[in-house]
């Protein structure tokens, strides 16, 4: 008798400005998931928020000639659906009738940005009593908001880059005082939307005369804006996998994001460099850094994971300031912002996800080739989302 497969709804697209990148993330996951163990149901969400079955064709969701895929009903979305209490997937027919498409065992959210990685869909799935992959509602919401992340990490004793918070109220009534406060930060500055990913709306400010324009640009993406001091550093990241049965988090060896301006990399790790300039960015894994730096990064990643109450998979990113280790590029990242790790194989998604029906302990994730430089596009970089903190249903 053959083993019953776990039925996984891979959910992507969504209402945010990162819709197409979420589709590319799904392409990577759909191409890597173990079909012998999982019955996969691709579900796309349109920009208007409608849910639809999508043909199981990873290539249709990839970035092609820098063009992003888009989920539309009648396009990639072949059938409108809804998810009901307990995980029943229901087809919504054009004549107004509906029909059951069976039960979903677990949802794997690959949504980027608002309405997806900010605790929104996680809360919905909690209310529907449906299992899902990743962090909980609180961790997802906190990890999506750069300001909240900074407050929580600082409270845990983790160093963060100096910053000023710009809110609509302060910008309207205290603009002069706020600009003066930002002038106390060291140039260059990085001005960024507080609750967006994929570097959307981020500007590098080399002169204070550019500051107000940069704030206005970021506010078009999110009214809550951070102005941060730039840090001359190397960008290093490592995955964290939540412990099972009360065990401590497991932290992978760090990898380094290396950019090559001669191949089209921008001044910082912006949207174009992340997703479009494939030959300009490489992942060096493990990162070529001193043992002391490696140990500090892994310990800090675990501490950040715990401080934000994360579960399942996260990818805390840190900076290696020049005062400790050599490096020569400006980075726009603040310390240890949490991102979901989507290029880890699904079979290591964690005990809460409902993916281990056999009850066997998950293997430790493989996080890339040893000490090799590969273009990120070949490592599923497009599948490495910047939706911060995915959530897994409590079981």
Image: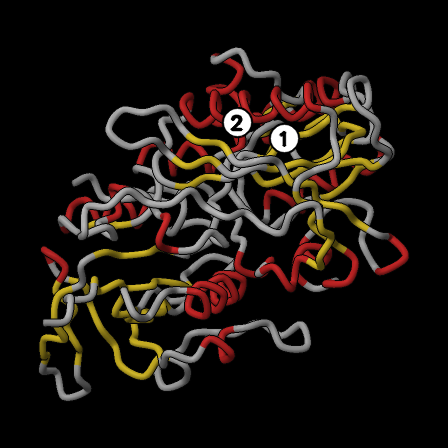
Position of residue 97 measured from the top left corner of the image (x, y, whole percent)? 9, 82
Determine the image quadrant of residue 191: top right
Instruction: Specify few, some or many for label 2: CA neighbours under 10 Å numbering under 14, 14-19, or 20 or more.
Output: many
Q: Secondary structure beneath disc 1? A: strand
**Mark 1 highlights which residue?**
318
Quarter occupied by the N terminus? bottom left
- What's the residue at 70%, 45% (across, down)? 371
Task: Report the residue that reaches farthest toward the right.
Answer: 262
Position of residue 276 measured from the top left corner of the image (x, y, whole percent)? 70, 64
- What's the residue at 25%, 77% (across, down)? 80
Total count of labels: 2
The residues tagged by marks 2 and 1 sit, at their Cα atoms, a distance apart of: 8 Å
Query: Which of 99/251 is in front?
Result: 251
247 versus 125 height, above or below: above
Q: Is residue 118 left or right of residue 187?
A: left
**Mark 2 highlights which residue?**
301
Quarter occupied by the C terminus? top left
Determine the image quadrant of residue 254: top right
Query: Which of 84/376 is in front?
Result: 376
- Say if mark 2 contacts mark 1, CB within 8 Å: yes
């Amino acid at each position: 008798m053959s083993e019953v497969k776990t039925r996984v709804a891979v959910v992507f697209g969504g209402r945010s400005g990162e819709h197409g990148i979420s589709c590319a993330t799904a392409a990577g996951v759909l191409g890597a998931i173990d079909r012998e163990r999982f019955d996969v149901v691709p579900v796309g969400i349109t920009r208007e928020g409608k849910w639809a079955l999508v043909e199981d064709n990873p290539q249709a969701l990839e970035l092609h000639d820098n063009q992003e895929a888009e989920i539309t009903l009648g396009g990639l979305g072949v059938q409108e659906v809804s998810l009901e209490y307990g995980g029943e997937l229901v087809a919504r027919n054009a004549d107004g009738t509906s029909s059951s498409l069976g039960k979903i065992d677990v949802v794997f959210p690959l949504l980027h940005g608002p309405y997806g990685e900010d605790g929104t869909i996680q809360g919905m799935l909690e209310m529907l009593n449906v299992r899902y992959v990743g962090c909980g509602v609180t961790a997802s919401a906190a990890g999506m908001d750069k300001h909240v992340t900074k407050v929580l990490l600082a409270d845990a004793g983790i160093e963060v880059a100096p910053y000023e918070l710009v809110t609509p109220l302060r910008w309207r009534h205290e603009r002069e005082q706020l600009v003066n406060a930002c002038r106390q930060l060291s140039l260059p500055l990085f001005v960024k939307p507080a609750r967006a990913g994929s570097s959307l709306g981020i500007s590098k400010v080399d002169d204070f005369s550019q500051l107000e324009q940069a704030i206005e640009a970021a506010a078009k993406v999110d009214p809550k804006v951070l102005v941060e001091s730039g840090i001359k550093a190397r960008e290093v990241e490592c995955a964290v996998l939540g412990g099972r049965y009360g065990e401590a988090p497991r932290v992978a060896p760090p990898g380094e994001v290396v950019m090559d301006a001669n191949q089209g990399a921008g001044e910082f790790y912006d949207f174009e460099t992340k997703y479009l300039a494939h030959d300009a960015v490489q992942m060096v894994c493990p990162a070529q850094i001193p043992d002391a730096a490696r140990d500090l990064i892994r310990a800090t990643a675990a501490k950040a994971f715990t401080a934000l109450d994360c579960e399942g998979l996260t990818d805390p990113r840190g900076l290696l300031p020049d005062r400790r280790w050599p490096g020569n590029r400006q980075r726009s990242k603040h310390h240890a912002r949490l991102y979901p790790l989507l290029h880890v194989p699904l079979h290591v998604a964690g005990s809460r996800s409902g993916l281990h029906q056999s009850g066997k302990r998950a293997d430790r994730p493989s996080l890339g080739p040893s000490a090799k430089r590969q273009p990120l596009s070949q490592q599923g970089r497009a599948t490495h989302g910047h939706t911060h903190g995915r959530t897994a249903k409590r079981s």
